[in-house]
Image (spheres, rainbow, N blue to C red):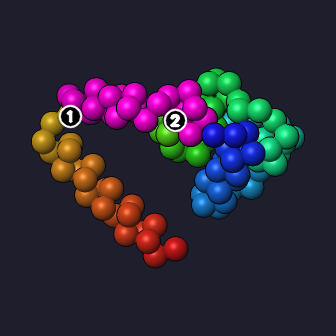
Amino acid sequence: MRAEEFGLFIRSLRKEKQMTIRQLELYSGVSHSYLSQLENGKKDIPSANVINKISKALKLPQELLMQKAGYIERDQLVDLKQNKFQDLTDDEIRYLEEQLELFRRLKGKK
């Protein structure tokens, strides 16, 4: 993914969360000027450290942004997901499935 595309992706995620750049700055610790330049394609793909800060502020899995940025290949992402959730109990899996279904329904209403 090119830097411009990644920046637009970050902007769309931020707006989907109804956050301003200043709010993202506050929650991530990444300066608003850097975030603005990133969203406008004037900065290269950020480091893994910056991606981690942004993903936490947006409450998204770091792996998602790392994959979009090109740090993780899709196959590696699948492996990470499988390893990450292998120790869940059946009750935890059912709960997560219910939450995912709710998320998908809510997202579909926007």
The residue sitting at 44% across, 71% down in the picture is 108
Identify residue for label 2: 67
Task: Report helix, strand or loop for mark 1.
Answer: loop
Identify residue for label 1: 88
Q: Nearer the viewer, mark 1 or mark 2?
A: 2
Residue 52's x, y, as percent?
59, 30
- Among the 4 quarters of the image, the one containing residue 83: top left
Residue 106's x, y, as percent?
42, 69
Of helix, strand and loop, which mostly describes the magenta segment?
helix
Q: Earlier in the sequence, mark 1 or mark 2?
A: 2
In this picture, residue 10 sits left or right of residue 33: left
Closer to the camera in the image, 69 or 2: 2
Closer to the camera in the image, 77 or 85: 77
Closer to the camera in the image, 87 or 75: 75
Res. 102 mark = none
The residue sitting at 38% across, 63% down in the picture is 104
Q: Is residue 106 above or below residue 65?
A: below
Using the numbered discs, state the Cα–Cα distance from disc 1 to disc 2 in whole angstroms: 24 Å
> How many residues crowd mark 2 within 10 Å: few (<14), some (14–19), many (20+)?
some
Q: Is residue 64 visible?
A: yes
Q: Is residue 84 visible?
A: no
Q: Amino acid at mark 1?
A: Leu
Residues shaded magenta: 65-87
Residue 49's x, y, as percent?
64, 23
The residue sitting at 25% across, 53% down in the picture is 97
Q: Amino acid at mark 2?
A: Gln
Q: Quadrant of the N terminus?
A: top right
Per the image, is 70 magenta?
yes
